[in-house]
Image: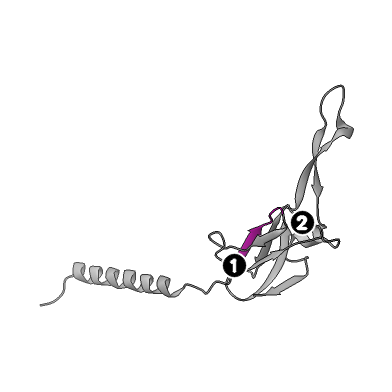
Amino acid sequence: MKPTRISRRVLCAVFLVSFASTLVGCWQPRQVKVSGRVTFADGTPLTYGQVCFSDGYYLGRGDLDENGEYELRIFRKNDGIPPGVYQAYITCAIRLEADDSRASRGNPGLAKLVMLIDRQYMTERTSGWVCEV
């Protein structure tokens, strides 16, 4: 008996779904837990910002805590990043401070942004930090 066009389409659709699910199941890269601490030269921790590791495809990020410590993640908290060579940099290393010099006649001063690190370390192209995981 000759198959009909409908059965050929169904067979093709089943094959494509099976093939796609096989590829998705095989694509789980090994993740490596990465953590660290960011300090200034005098040893005080950088407590504002986010550490980023980028290889052009993956972007691992970790928020700095009150001790300057971080744990990288890609999708979920503490899931790590795949092994490889990464450019590291720090983003959002800024803090708001009151600017009393702008206060006038009883109005409180406006807040100003204070950058905590040099701009050089805020992008992967200029930081100069290369890390192998």
Secondary structure beneath label 1: loop
The number of callouts visible is 2
Q: Which mark is residue 14?
A: none
Left or right? Give the position of 119 relative to 60.
Answer: right
What's the amino acid at mark 1? Answer: Tyr
What is the span of residues highlighted in magenta in the rendered image? Answer: 57-66
Q: Which of 8/90 is in front?
A: 90
What's the amino acid at mark 2? Answer: Leu
Quarter occupied by residue 34: bottom right
Q: Residues within 10 Å of mark 1 (few under 14, many from 20)?
A: few
Image quadrant for the C terminus? bottom right
Image quadrant for the N terminus? bottom left
Measuring from the top left, give residue 84's x and y in whole percent: 62, 76
2 vs 1, front mark: 2
Q: Is residue 106 above or below residue 81?
A: above
Q: Which of 2/124 is in front?
A: 124
Quarter occupied by residue 110: top right
Q: Residues within 10 Å of mark 2 (few under 14, many from 20)?
A: many
Q: Which of 54/41 is in front?
A: 41
Q: Is residue 120 above or below residue 15?
A: above
Measuring from the top left, give residue 7's x and y in whole percent: 19, 70
Q: Say which residue label 2 marks.
A: 46
Q: Which mark is residue 58?
A: 1
Colour scheme of the picture: one colour
